[in-house]
Amino acid sequence: DTLVNQIAAGEVVERPANALKELLENSIDAGSVNLNVELMAGGTKLIKVIDDGIGIGRDDLALALHRHATSKIRDFDDLQRVATLGFRGEGLASIASVSRLVLTSRERDGSHAWRVEADHGRLTEPEPAALSVGTTIEVHDLYYQLPARRKFLKSDSTEYAHCADMVQRLALANPDKQFTLTHNGRAQQRYLAGDLAKRAAAILGDEFAASAIAIDEAAGPLRIHGLTGSPTLGKASRDAQYFFVNGRFVRDKVIQHALREAYRDVLHHDRHAAYCLFLDLEPEGVDVNVHPTKIEVRFRESQAVYRFLLHSLKKALADTRA
Ligand code: ADP
Ligand code: MG
């Protein structure tokens, strides 16, 4: 089982940022409103996520670290309409198989917390621990027993940059939650709970927020909303392009093409704009299970999605020009 998990880990957890994503998505699924991230050495020494979600009871701690133990899917139909971020039940098991993981959690009605430790998949018995309501997960020394994997890790500063990006993506998708990030004991980012405009200003910059065009269009099961950068914003780069499908950050050719076309048609130029946009559609309309790291999507009706995006963007851009 440990071997299976370690192989899965190679897919799910390419680097610390992927582990961090799994942990933060679990915290979000658990209804947390305060998410604190502490990293050491770009996440290679330590990834710690402290949340204030519903917590995990004593008897479910071991289960949470078990492969295909997910509390989020009950049957195959659920699989077809995944609404939560996690649903494969292999995130924690994979991470625990390639690190030393400490899981401490206290349920809302629990009188105290419980703590388990997993060293490369070997689990300790739950012990009482002190913690306010919520869950804290520490991932120590990712891949330290797997030198072949470890050597794929880049410098601490590169791994840190990937982690910081990951926090920003999740922070943009969840402006109503507070996020903090520290690295090697130093505070790096603090995003106070607020609305999308405030969050976008904090992450994409005040200049973006001041000139961004708000979009909110719907057609049938499709809705697009968010902020798209005014094209006068010259320094927009690919790094400032955030697109979320049903709350998940994605990079997709169909989407990118539609956005580029809209800018070209209305404003007659090719420069990439910055944006932070959310496409929501019925879960059946999109396959998010293409790859374990879940950054790609496959639309059932990709032409319809394309046309909808193109039309909505063009309309929003034309409105502001008029
Ligand atoms: P998945 O997210 O796909 O269900 P994971 O391996 O990531 O699988 O997590 C396994 C289970 O552990 C989750 O279904 C959830 O019940 C529990 N869990 C993990 N992290 C948390 C958390 N931060 N707060 C509450 N429950 C959690
Ligand atoms: Mg998960």
Image: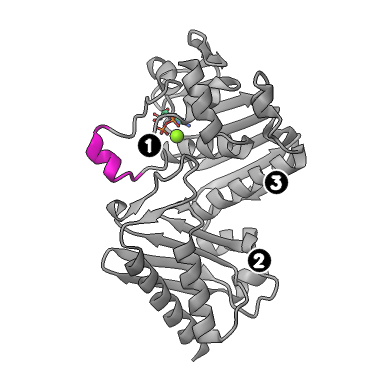
Instruction: Give residue 19's position: percent from left, percent from top.
Output: 57, 34
C-beta proximity under 8 Å, tags 1 and 3: no
Alpha carbon separation for disc pair 2 and 1: 32 Å
Instruction: Give residue 150's position: percent from left, percent from top.
Output: 68, 28
Q: Secondary structure at mark 3?
A: helix
Nearest the viewer among 321 and 120 is: 120
Q: Which residue is mark 3?
A: 161
Instruction: Give residue 209's position: percent from left, percent from top.
Output: 60, 69
Q: Secondary structure at mark 2?
A: loop
Instruction: Read off the magenta span.
Output: 74-83
302 left or right of 202 in image = left
Give neighbour class at mark 2: few <14, some 14-19, many 20+ (Cα, 10 Å). few
- In the picture shown, does residue 200 fall above or below 120? below
Q: Which residue is mark 2?
A: 237
- Residue at image position (50%, 60%) is 243
Residue 98 visible here = yes
Q: Quadrant of residue 119?
A: top right
Q: Give the mark, 2 or 1, whose residue is nearer the N terminus.
A: 1
Q: Amino acid at mark 1?
A: Phe
Alpha carbon separation for disc pair 2 and 3: 16 Å
Q: Is-magenta flag for residue 236?
A: no
92 left or right of 14 in image = left
- Residue at image position (51%, 26%) is 7
Q: Ligand 2 shows up in which quadrant of the image?
A: top left
- Residue at image position (56%, 47%) is 178
- In the picture shown, does residue 85 fall above or below 137? below
Give neighbour class at mark 3: few <14, some 14-19, many 20+ (Cα, 10 Å). some
Q: Amino acid at mark 2?
A: Ser
Give neighbour class at mark 1: few <14, some 14-19, many 20+ (Cα, 10 Å). many
Q: Which residue is mark 1?
A: 87
